[in-house]
């Protein structure tokens, strides 16, 4: 039975959490920028004060035992709240020269956010955005970031997620491709050079009732690069409607069919941030601006659709597959 709770070394709890997560004292020491000996001593001190062991030692690896797992479940929420509080205090201490650190997808940065940065600077010259493009998972606390702009279902534990916009996959091509395909059915698209993953094109054609084993001429790990290749006439593609908004409005790309591919788990774009930063003025300002710009993009897309419909002679539009017959997803 624990009798010295008042003397519990609370400073050892973050170290305990790091070792538990890494399942290694050495890896935790590297993360914490401490020596292996210092981390071992902190764990020993915590176990001595508690009166029981928290880990099973297996050579160089360690694993939580039942007591350690119970303690981790209990202290993680409190440690996360402390982490968020420290971040909020650091943000508030920045004073007038506010800096908002943002992680975002490279394609979203290139195709949507960067073209609007001039507007942001004109309206909010006192708030600097530091953009860090990344396709991988990011730990906001570990990497010193204030928010993330990501695609998905909006389920990120420990973070507040606000949906910015939905953006299904649509078929896109340069104006010359649209002229070639005008008035023809979806099977004509199979004769075009296709860009992107074959499995998504196969699903798109399947929605039209066509069984076609496609062989795209190129695939990309970044949607921004794929859209750039499409603009340069390399082929036609399936891409996020939001990422193509400016190119559609400027006529650099043309929507080739009405049908879309939807997946509720990844179609939406979100801003996610720690709860402690919800009321931090620079981040709140950035969030409001994002929502305003997203609404403007959606209006822009609706205007493009309306203009395309008005410009198309009756019966000349490509026959589009029904979106109700299938679903597809991409990252």
Image: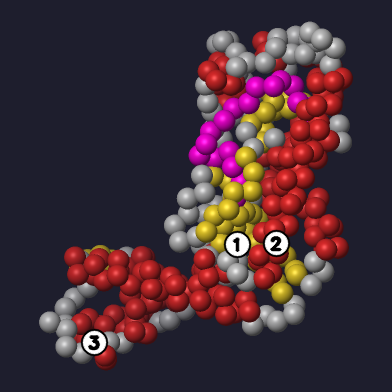
2 and 1 marks in contact (CB < 8 Å): yes
Q: Earlier in the sequence, mark 3 or mark 1?
A: 3
Location of residue 143 with respect to 112 vertically, above or below: below
| Residue shown at 54% from the left, 28% from the top | 328
Residue 312 lies within the magenta run: no
Quick one: which residue is furthest to the left in this view?
1
Q: Is residue 255 magenta?
A: yes
Query: Which SS class for mark 2?
Result: helix
What secondary structure is found at the residue carrying circle 3? helix
Give coordinates of residue 132: x percent, y percent.
66, 60
* Quarter of the picture holding the N terminus: bottom left
Q: Residue under circle 2?
A: 286
What residue is pinned by disc 1? 147
User: Which region shows up in magenta?
Assistant: 252-270
At 29% from the left and 80% from the top, the residue drawn is 43
* Residue 185 in view (yes/no): yes
Image coordinates for residue 324, horizontal then vertical, percent: 55, 20
The answer to whether the residue labelled 2 contacts the one labelled 3, judged by CB atoms less than 8 Å apart, is: no
Comparing 250 with 39, the one in front is 250
Q: CA distance from mark 2 to mark 3?
A: 43 Å
Q: Is residue 161 left or right of residue 185?
A: left
| N-terminal-most mark, 2 or 3 | 3
At x 33%, y 72%, the residue is: 75
The residue identified by callout 3 is 5
Residue drawn at (72%, 74%) of the image? 98
Helix or strand or loop: what does disc 1 sit on? strand
Q: On the image, which quarter does residue 63 sit in? A: bottom left
Q: Nearer the viewer, residue 159 or 239?
A: 159
Mark 3: few/some/many CA within 10 Å (<14, 14-19, 20+): few
- Decide if residue 90 is on the left or right side of residue 120: left
Please tell me in which quadrant of the rendered image residue 10 appears.
bottom left
């Amino acid at each position: 039975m624990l009798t010295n709770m008042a003397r519990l070394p609370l400073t050892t709890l973050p170290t305990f959490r790091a070792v538990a997560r890494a399942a290694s004292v050495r890896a935790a020491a590297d993360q914490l920028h401490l020596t292996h000996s210092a981390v071992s001593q902190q764990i020993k001190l915590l176990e001595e004060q508690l009166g029981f062991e928290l880990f099973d030692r297996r050579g160089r690896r360690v694993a939580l035992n039942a007591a350690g797992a119970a303690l981790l479940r209990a202290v993680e929420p409190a440690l996360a709240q402390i982490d968020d509080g420290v971040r909020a205090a650091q943000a508030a201490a920045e004073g007038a020269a506010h800096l908002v650190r943002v992680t975002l997808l490279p394609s979203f940065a290139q195709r949507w956010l960067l073209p609007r940065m001039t507007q942001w600077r004109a309206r909010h010259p006192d708030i600097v955005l530091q953009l860090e493009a990344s396709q991988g998972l990011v730990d906001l606390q570990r990497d010193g970031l204030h928010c993330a702009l990501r695609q998905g279902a909006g389920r990120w534990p420990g973070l507040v997620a606000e949906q910015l916009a939905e953006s299904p996959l649509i078929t896109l091509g340069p104006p010359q491709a649209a002229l070639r395909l005008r008035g023809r059915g979806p099977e004509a698209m199979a004769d075009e050079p296709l860009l992107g993953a074959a499995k998504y094109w196969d699903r798109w054609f399947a929605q039209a009732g066509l069984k076609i084993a496609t062989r795209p001429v190129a695939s990309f790990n970044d949607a921004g690069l794929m859209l750039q290749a499409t603009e340069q006439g390399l082929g036609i593609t399936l891409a996020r409607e939001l990422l193509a908004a400016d190119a559609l409005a400027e006529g650099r790309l043309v929507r080739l069919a009405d049908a879309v591919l939807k997946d509720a788990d990844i179609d939406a774009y979100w801003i996610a941030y720690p709860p402690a930063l919800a009321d931090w003025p620079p981040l709140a300002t950035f969030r409001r601006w994002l929502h305003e710009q997203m609404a403007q993009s959606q209006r822009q897309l609706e205007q493009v659709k309306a203009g395309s419909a008005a410009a198309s002679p009756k019966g000349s539009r490509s026959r589009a597959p029904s979106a109700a017959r299938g679903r597809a997803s991409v990252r």
